[in-house]
Image: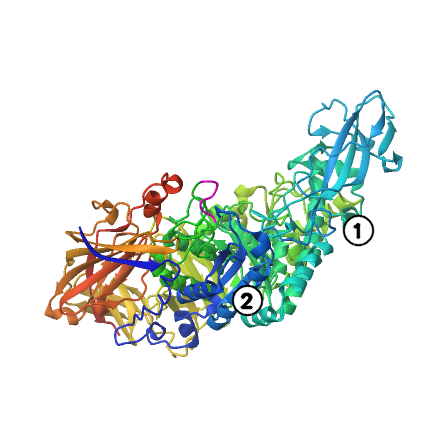
Amino acid sequence: MNEVSRRTILAATAGAGVAAALPWSLPGGGKAAAQGSHAGSFAEAFAIPPRSVQGRFRWWWPHGLVDPTEIAREVDQIADAGFGGVEIADVHHSVEEPLDPAEHGWGTRPWVAAVEAALGRAAERGVTVDITIGPSWPAALPTVTPQSTAAVSELAHGLVKVDGGSYDGEIPGPAVEPASGVTERRLHTVQAARLADGAALEKPYRLDPASVTDLMDSVRDGRLGFTAPDDGTWLIIATWLRGSGQRPEAGPHTEPASYVVDHFSAAGTQAVIDFWEGEILNPRLRELIRRTGGAMFEDSIELETEATLWTPAMFDEFRRRKGYDLLPYLPVVLRMHEDGVFSYDGVTDRRVSDDLNDVRSELYIEHHLRPLQEWLHGLGLGLRIQPYGLETDALASSAVVDTPEGESLGFNNLDDFRSLAGGRDMGGNERLSSEAAAVYGGSYNTTWDHVVRTVSREYAAGVNQAVLHGFSYANAPGARWPGFAAFTPYDGGVGYSESWGPRHPIWRHAPDIAGFMARSQFVLQTGTSRVDVAFLRQKGYAGTGFGAAWFTPEGIPLGWTHQFLSPRLLELPSARVADGRLASDGPGYKMLVFEGDAFNGKVETMPLATARRLLEFARDGLPILAVGGWDAPTVPGVPEPGENEELTEVMARLLAQPSVHRVDSRAGIADGVAALGLRPDVRYAESSPLLHARRHEDDAEYYYFVNGSDDEVVDHDVTFATTVWPVIPYRLDLWTGGVERAVVHEAERGAVRLRVRLDPGAATVIVLARPNWLGDGVAAGRGVRSTEADAVKEIEERVVVRAASSGTYRSTLANARTVSTRIDSVPDELPLTDWKLTLEDWRPGASPTETDVRGHERELDSPVPWTELPGLADVSGVGRYSATVHLGPAWTGGHGAYLHLGEVSDTFRVSVNGKALPPADQQTAVVDVGGFLREGRNTIEIEMASTLLNRMRVFRPDVYGAVDRSRYGLAGPVRLVPYGQARLM
């Protein structure tokens, strides 16, 4: 091993200009945007996507303790890498020395000045800036105390047993101690209740609901006199209204301390608006906000209390919205440490709780989301929000806000995203965002491969904007190399990924990943989302991990797509049936499916208004599949007199409609779908791990596909239903931006069939378009039905066949004519020799933001991960493997070759004869190098980049030492596999 170089770089500036340093071009000098013969506006924008569709980062700041010059530099780093947006967040869980919130906390003058610097530089670079609604989360303000009417509140109950049949004493105080800062409380209710016959004096206390008595009129000067009317065991239950005292996550962020606002009252939201208007939004900020056009962001509804979450006007709001008084039922909704304290019976408890959660949903939308969004629109901002965390209707909220957002970490499966997507699409909104690729324990060891696989699958579930978690500001007090990282160390161990940026060796390849994400999001923001099935749930919860019966485990592998709807979504103007589809101008569901309440033992319950809507849909011709008996349904919540009887009658009429089919259980869903005569718009001959999303325009339909398997190759025909005719299919390369005709296919009016091959985790886009979609005037009939060759491609307006061996290959054209094509010779696999490894070894430098890069060289017989070479096991960095191959004089004829890299970790790039090739599919690790090889000696270089984990293991073993060493570099086997090529037509 030779020490060949030593240099020091600043981690804060190492990645600047990296995109500009990659002027790769195609043979003949054409840039990516000009690839192929199609130069239409879509192809140009797809090749070089605009900032508006590029991926984004959460941008974590240690308060306002940031330098405006560094802020501008970090905007440049993000923009140069090909990302189009940031979200400024006051997050500093890992800061190891105290910060001074009074001097530079959230909302202070230094913080505002830093936001101005970020917005100013972002405006110059075309980068979108989102700003979190307050310090950390949930929304909180330093002008709010637990005693404020704007603060989130709770009901804390007290309890005393009546001995001897009577009580004369003080009102029982709260059983749960108040949080820090809570200094006031107000008596809210006093009730007496008798334990039910045979009930034990233990939680949850089972009460006789007929015995519950309001005693507020008996309270005098804080004392109560009560005589039990019978010999049973009686309890006196008092509730006290007080602030919850909840503070935002991982404070303090401000001085004075901030407290969480009431998300269910107008006062809470108005306090947020007033603070921003009075304390933050100076004229310069307002101007910059209008120029950058971002959004305000609020994290999930993590309102946490040890007592009962409340809002002061709840009794009045509940009575107005539900038509009955909550007070007699209050005991069954009281909570202590999130557990119920009292019970009447399981059914009543659940019904009243459902009604309370329903009211909370309405209050959250009416008093928080709508006024907040109206105010923001006046500023030129949108509202991006994670509308889940409580048992509220997140689907309805997703239809209201400009951009709903889910999360990779907190969501248990892709159906959680499909829930929010249903709300987005029914509300007519464009984007569904994801807090993407956070991994517990993933700090400094999250790979781009993990990011790509994660977001690719989320894209197939309706996500079309990824906000990566995240990008940390360069430095903070007490930070150690490679700089401040917002979430690591975390509780003394490895925290949440990731602190992306130039501190990472793999940031060198960030533009390739950014391009993949931007092109995916460009396609998925084009046109209108189209989905096969609307799965109706009685509750609009999200983030639950609940799938759709049959469709998730069985239907998706057959090509079905689905989303979830809640009853409120069926009241939207979009919820109309035309041509047998629900919301025909939007998602265009061809079928609606419902069953019993999945969140309550599949009890057959349905709001009466929803049942009436379903009856309208069925009469308008929408196919509906009912799962269960539905002969004695009940409304959710506490029914009004006669309401259940009316529901039974409406459901009977619904089930009698010719477009409605009922099956007894989930086991019959497949048969029920068949009985309705329906098929998905995308079909496979057999079960497949393919996942897909569809977007529709009048002239083109876009199908995003990803192989959801980690180890199974997809290679089979796919049949598409389409309204486009005449039709030409195209394949879009999400890595290079190339657009090419899918020459081999079969097409007839209403359907196209072609083959899709994807390695594990790989993604592609198929477009079915009219002949003039790209302005190229290609004739629809110019295609190939089938071929014996390995592939048929269109290159510079010529159709050619490719094969890995010589021979004559027959192809059947679109007009049914058979054509034979001869490939005379194809070389055997060619060995790559004289391997050399040049390795950059990234180590801690002289300061937390400096990186010392040392060089190593090795001569190798074959590619080997550098972690398996003596002395290099702990190296994190960038390795370049180079080899030579000699090609004969015939090479410039009809030969090309694929470079198969084998096993790689993490990201790679390929150069041939000193020329950088286009970004390669990181999942497939196969690169077409045919157009770059030449007769004689050829040098192939494979650049590999790693995470920082291995170096962090030895630099900070107390934090990272327990994590297994990663295998970095090129393991191979590397193969150069030639192909022959000859013109077909």
Specify start and end residues of the magenta stretch as a single range: 487-492
Query: Does any portion of residue 532 appear in the rendered image?
Result: no
Q: Mark 2 points at which residue?
A: 116
Residue sitting nearer the eye, 16 or 629: 16
Whether residue 111 is visible here, answered yes or no, is: yes
Question: In the image, residue 560 lies at what x, y percent?
Answer: 48, 54
Give the Cα separation between the discs numbered 1 and 2: 45 Å
Q: Which of marks 1 and 2 is in front?
A: 2
Residue 642 picture quarter: top right
Seen in the image, is 457 located left or right of residue 368?
A: left
Tell me the tag on residue 487: none
| 817 vs 336, nearest the viewer | 336
| Residue type for callout 2 | Glu
Q: Is residue 261 above or below residue 308?
A: below
Per the rendering, the mark at residue 320 is: 1
Task: Tell whether 908 sits left or right of 101.
Answer: left
In the image, residue 359 lies at what x, y percent?
Answer: 72, 49
**Residue type beneath disc 1:** Arg
- Of residue 529 and residue 515, the one placed in the foreground of this image is 515
Q: Is residue 14 left or right of residue 232?
A: left
